[in-house]
Amino acid sequence: EGASPRELMEKAGEQLRSGDWPAAKASLEAVKVKNPEQEYLWASLGFVAEMQRNYDEAKSDFRKELAHHPDNANVVGALAGAEKKSGDPVAAQRIIHSYLDRHPEELRLSLLLASLQISAEDYSAALKTLQSAADNHPDDRSVRLQLSDVLHRLNRNDEAAAAAKSVLDGADDPGLL
């Protein structure tokens, strides 16, 4: 019988942290035999596959994790990252957008989506994403700073200047000033 799935997951976590991908994969495969619905099993297998640059397997594993735990923002981000690394940034955007439709308050994924949109030079879409993020996180300076950048790229310089000024107002961070 041996170790429980939870114990094997802990062991795999230690192996992942030490960079021993083959041992981690073996531990995770043992979990899969005992409990294929173990939380984080498929995400961990996806992470190992991604580290080995097997993006198709990573995407498949991340999707399996999301089938069991659809509200895991970290796995959504990981799946989007694997899509981008495999050459499909449009799929990456679609995955994040779909999640944000259900969870508009998720700041990290909003910023990731905006970054993908900016990379694709889709500044209008990035503006919409960042405006939504700003609505949900009005005190977040990083959102307003990126908003300023996108407004500038869209040649909306007065609005860009106002957004930049709002970032600086009340700031005492020497790195920002």
Image (cartoon, grey):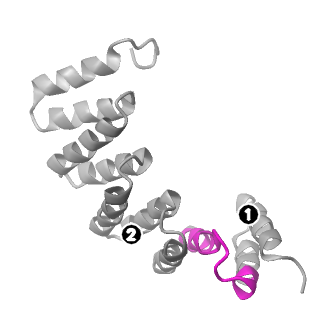
Residue in the image at 40% along x and 19% along y? 176
Q: Looking at the picture, how far across and down is residue 160, in whole percent?
A: 18, 27
Give residue 13's mark.
1
Q: Earlier in the sequence, mark 1 or mark 2?
A: 1
Query: Which portion, as a residue range, is magenta?
Result: 30-50
Please, which residue is most extreme toward the front here? 102
Q: Residue at x 65, y 73 (%)?
A: 41
Instruction: Name the side, left or right, on which 161 lies relative to 172.
Output: left
Residue 118 image point, x, y percent: 25, 48
Please tell me in which quadrant of the rendered image residue 37 appears.
bottom right
Residue at the location (75% across, 85% down)? 34
- Asked if residue 143 is among those painted magenta in the image, a careful observer would answer no
Check disc 1: other Cα within 10 Å, few if <14, some if 14-19, many if 20+.
some
Q: Which quadrant is home to the N terminus?
A: bottom right
Residue 158 point in image, percent of width and height: 11, 23
Name above or below for residue 66 compared with residue 164: below
Q: Nearer the viewer, residue 171 or 115?
A: 171
Q: Amino acid at mark 1?
A: Gly
Secondary element at tag 1: helix
Q: Quadrant of the C terminus?
A: top left
Secondary structure under the numbered disc 2 in the rendered image: helix
Looking at the image, which residue is at 46% across and 16% down?
173
